[in-house]
Image: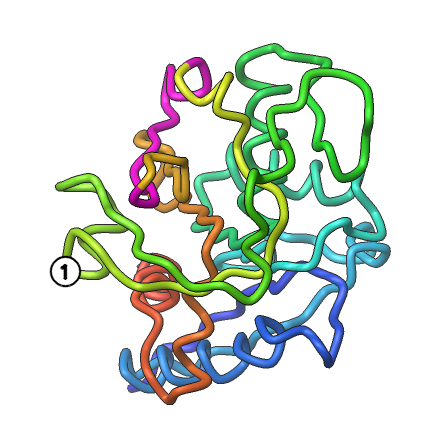
Amino acid sequence: MTKSIRVALIGDYRASAVAHQAIPPAVELAAKTLSLDVSADWIATPELDQHNLADYQASWLVPGSPYLNDEGVFAALRWARESAKPFLGSCGGFQYAIVEYARNVLGWEDATHAETDPGGRWVIAPLACSLVEQRGTVTFAPGSRIAQAYGALQSDEGYHCNFGVNAEFSEALATQNLRITSWDLAGDVRGIELIDHPFFVATLFQSERAALQNRLSPLVVAWLQAAAG
């Protein structure tokens, strides 16, 4: 009997966004591989208060920052982190997950994202070189959830971003239960995970883009596996 699960795709859909084009087929390909019946609800951020995330087996904060409802996004991130429900974040989802963690776990109340707040402590800052529609090699920490998902210690991945982790704070961020587990070849942070959470993984790169070449996204497969229990 095929197992049925519901997942929440949190973000403000734009048909022109490459990642948004890739996400539905990425979920479909992963679901087929895992023999799962997956119902994926796309939730626009202004509508988050109309949905109970506890009704879903997992959530994914998709690319597309700045979001239309930052407050709702940060609340959803905190819920995902504290609820032990599987969470995936990519691009903007990665950036906002870092800010939420800095604020609510590390106690950096002034932690901000340079794209949306010119003041405060920029834990997410402008990249030295734009990664809009760029590709590059990323490496994974041995034994990490990302490495386990890929079955490898590196991959070639695509991006669409101008912001990343502020290098001044990367060492301080990787304390308590957050671990940096992916880097580019220059050593800049490209992925994180929470070691005391069943599945909380976020990457600056967009692994979902693989679906546009009819290839599986290892992270989407791992996320759905975790959601299915």
Colour style of the rendered protein structure: rainbow
In the rendered image, the vertical position of residue 53 relative to residue 156, given as above or below:
above
Answer left or right for 151 relative to 156: left
Q: SS at mark 1? A: loop
Q: Residue 34, position in %: x, y?
A: 28, 78
The residue that label 1 is drawn on is 151
Quadrant of the snapshot with the C terminus: bottom left
Q: Residue at x 60, y 81 (%)?
A: 21
Answer left or right for 88 relative to 112: left
Quadrant of the snapshot with the N terminus: bottom left
Q: Amino acid at mark 1?
A: Gly
Q: Could you say which quadrant of the image residue 213 lies in?
A: bottom left
Q: Nearer the viewer, residue 85 or 9?
A: 9
In the rendered image, the vertical position of residue 57 relative to residue 164, given as above or below:
below
Q: Residue at x 54, y 57 (%)?
A: 60
Q: Residue 166, position in %: x, y?
A: 54, 26
Q: Nearer the viewer, residue 187 or 101?
A: 187
Q: Bin the neighbour count of mark 1 within 10 Å (Cα to Cα): few under 14, some 14-19, many 20 and up.
A: few
Q: Residue at x 82, y 50 (%)?
A: 49
**Magenta stretch, residue numbers:** 172-185
Answer left or right for 73 relative to 224: right
Q: Residue 7, position in %: x, y?
A: 54, 66
Q: Residue furthest front?
A: 129
Number of dots carrying numbers: 1
Q: Residue at x 51, y 60 (%)?
A: 159
